[in-house]
C-alpha cells in the first residue's frame, strides 16, 4: 500500500450508531451535536461520505427523506439532531419559515408608510402603488415646466418644424 494512505476497516451499523450517538448531548429539548461542524450544521462521516448529522438522525429515527426535500429545524438550532424538532419540507418553504430577507419581504403586507402592498409573487418586486403615485405627482409638480418644454420640443420635431415659440 502507498505511503500516507489510510484505509479504515469496514464498520457495522452498530459501530457507526455508537460513534454517532457518542457525539450527541441529550440535555433539555434539543439534542446538541458535539462533533465536527460545517456552515453551522453538524457533520458526520459514514463510509467516507460526509453528511449532515441532522439528516443522519432524521433518517435513522423517522425514515428516508424524499427527493427534493430538505430538513427544516423547527427549533431554529442548526446543531440540534432531535428528529422531533425537524420536518422534511421543500427548500422554498424552509426559506419562507426562516428569518432571512426573503422571508421578511414575503411576509410583509404594508410598506414603511402603512400602505397596503400587492400580493407577493416569488421572484417579482412589490412596489407600493400608492407611494409610486405620490412620488410621480410630486416629481411632476416640481418639474412641470421642464417636462412640458421637453414635450413641446419633441412634438414639434416630430411634426417636421425646426422650432416654434410657445
Image (cartoon, rainbow, N blue to C red):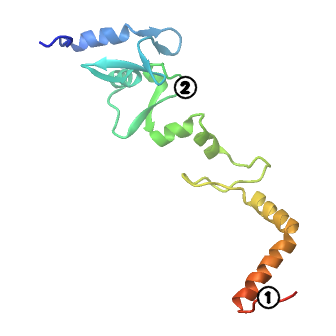
Mark 2 surroundings: few (<14), some (14-19) or many (≥20) residues within 10 A: few
Question: Which residue of the protein is positioned furthest toward the left in this rendering?
Answer: 1
- Is residue 68 found left or right of 6 in the rendered image? right
Query: Looking at the rendering, which quadrant does residue 34 occupy?
Result: top left
Q: How many marks?
A: 2
- Is residue 41 found left or right of 3 in the rendered image? right
| Viewer-closest of 58 and 141 | 141
Where is the N terminus found, in terms of image quarters?
top left
Residue 62 marker: none
User: What residue is drawn where x is 31% and y is 8%?
Assistant: 18
The residue tagged with tag 1: helix, strand or loop?
loop
The residue at which mark 1 appears reads as 163
Q: CA distance from mark 2 to mark 1?
A: 68 Å
Mark 1 surroundings: few (<14), some (14-19) or many (≥20) residues within 10 A: few
User: What residue is drawn where x is 48% and y is 19%?
Assistant: 79
The residue tagged with tag 2: helix, strand or loop?
loop
| Viewer-closest of 10 and 56 | 10
Amino acid at each position: 500500500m502507498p505511503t500516507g494512505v489510510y484505509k479504515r476497516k469496514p464498520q457495522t451499523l452498530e459501530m457507526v450508531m455508537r460513534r454517532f450517538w457518542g457525539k450527541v448531548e441529550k440535555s433539555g429539548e434539543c439534542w446538541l451535536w458535539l462533533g465536527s461542524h460545517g456552515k453551522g450544521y453538524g457533520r458526520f462521516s459514514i463510509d467516507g461520505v460526509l453528511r449532515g448529522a441532522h439528516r443522519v438522525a432524521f433518517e435513522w429515527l423517522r425514515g428516508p427523506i424524499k427527493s427534493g426535500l430538505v430538513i427544516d429545524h423547527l427549533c431554529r438550532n442548526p446543531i440540534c439532531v432531535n428528529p422531533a424538532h425537524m420536518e422534511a419540507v421543500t427548500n422554498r418553504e424552509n426559506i419562507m419559515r426562516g428569518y432571512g430577507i426573503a422571508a421578511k419581504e414575503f411576509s410583509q403586507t404594508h410598506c414603511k408608510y402603512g400602505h397596503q402592498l400587492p400580493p407577493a409573487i416569488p421572484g417579482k418586486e412589490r412596489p407600493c402603488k400608492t407611494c409610486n403615485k405620490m412620488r410621480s405627482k410630486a416629481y411632476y409638480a416640481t418639474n412641470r415646466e421642464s417636462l412640458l418644454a421637453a414635450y413641446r420640443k419633441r412634438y414639434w420635431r416630430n411634426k417636421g418644424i425646426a422650432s416654434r415659440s410657445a
